[in-house]
Image (cartoon, rainbow, N blue to C red):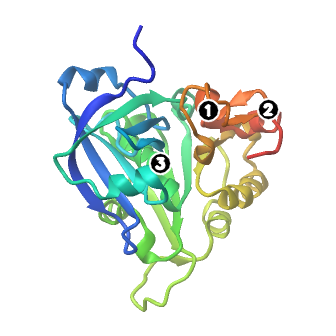
Amino acid sequence: MRNPYLPYPVRIDKITTETVDRNLKTFRFVFLNPEDEEKFAYTPGQFAELSIPGKGEIPIGIASSPTEKGFVAFTVNKVGLVSSYLHNMQEGEVMGIRGPLGNWYPWDEMEGQNVIIVGGGFAFTTLRSSIIYMLDPQNRPKFKDIIVVYGARNPGMLLYRDELAAWEQRDDIHMHITVDGTDDPDWKYNVGFVPAITEKKITSAEDAIAIVCGPPIMIKFTQPVLEKLGFPPEKIILSLEMRMKCGIGICGRCNIGDQYVCKDGPVFSLAKLKKMPPEY
């Protein structure tokens, strides 16, 4: 049995600065031992611990898709000791990844459905993984319409801008990009908070399932919008990434009632969350 605390050694292959404040960077890692890539088999929605010897670990949602071979990617916000150290590391340096951890979006249930994706800010990472996964030619026929509402504070804080622009040009995915505010006269997308744009752009819950990942305040105000549209609680899927800790339910810091977000989540249906204490 593999030691769950033992990370796989990886090399930083590429670093991309995502936002104008330079606090969000995407790190692409390559496994030093090719067989470790197969062992690190993951599904969109899962997370992993990024491990730096002498500094610690941080739980981060996996931003790459399992359909993207040869690497795994994470987008990291510079907010603490480990993430700040990581932001100063260079391409070619070696560190560790422990995982994959947690559950994933309910892909079997999503097949044959319209898929509504609602995301905000830095939490768009696992939703990026999901979109890439669904748009893969082998997977796209499994899903009906794919509709995305994604927002950030301003245009400079949007992640994956080249991919957003490419998805905008496709006819098999419907993009609704928004920002809280902007003084950019050339801004051609929406202005408004994610819940308001969701209410405006999503018009039906028929044959649809919604997956939501974002800041707690965004989730709080998006949830009633989806319920008003007619989504039953079992078809509103939420990812509580802000609660992830050690990844295996040992440290006891991620629990909501008797559920451990790291082990039983981070993905929960609203139907399940309604049976838990309102602490998310």
Closest to the observer, 80 or 112:
80
Label ID, residue 265: 1
Nearer the N terminus, badge 3 or badge 1?
A: 3
Residue at 21% over, 54% down: 90
Nearer the N terminus, badge 1 or badge 2?
A: 2
Q: 10 Å neighbourhood of mark 3: few (<14), some, or many (≥20)?
A: many
- Look at the numbered discs 3 and 1 and tell me whether their residues touch, using CB distance below 8 Å: no
Label ID, residue 257: 2
Quadrant location of residue 206?
Answer: top right
Q: Closer to the observer: label 3 or label 1?
A: 1
The three-letter amino acid code for the residue at tag 1 is: Gly
Q: In which quadrant of the rendered image does the N terminus lie?
A: top left
Distance from Cα at disc 3 to Cα at disc 2: 26 Å
Distance from Cα at disc 1 to Cα at disc 2: 13 Å
Q: Secondary structure at mark 3?
A: helix
Label ID, residue 202: none
Q: Is residue 140 visible?
A: no
Q: Where's residue 40, x and y in %?
A: 34, 25
Closest to the observer, 275 or 99:
99
The three-letter amino acid code for the residue at tag 3 is: Leu
Q: Is residue 97 depicted above or below 188 in this figure?
A: above
Nearer the N terminus, badge 3 or badge 2?
A: 3
Q: Where's residue 260, x and y in %?
A: 67, 30
The three-letter amino acid code for the residue at tag 2 is: Gly
* Residue marked by disc 3: 127
Q: Secondary structure at mark 1?
A: loop
Q: 10 Å neighbourhood of mark 2: few (<14), some, or many (≥20)?
A: few
Q: Where's residue 250, x and y in %?
A: 61, 25
Q: Secondary structure at mark 2?
A: loop
Distance from Cα at disc 3 to Cα at disc 1: 15 Å
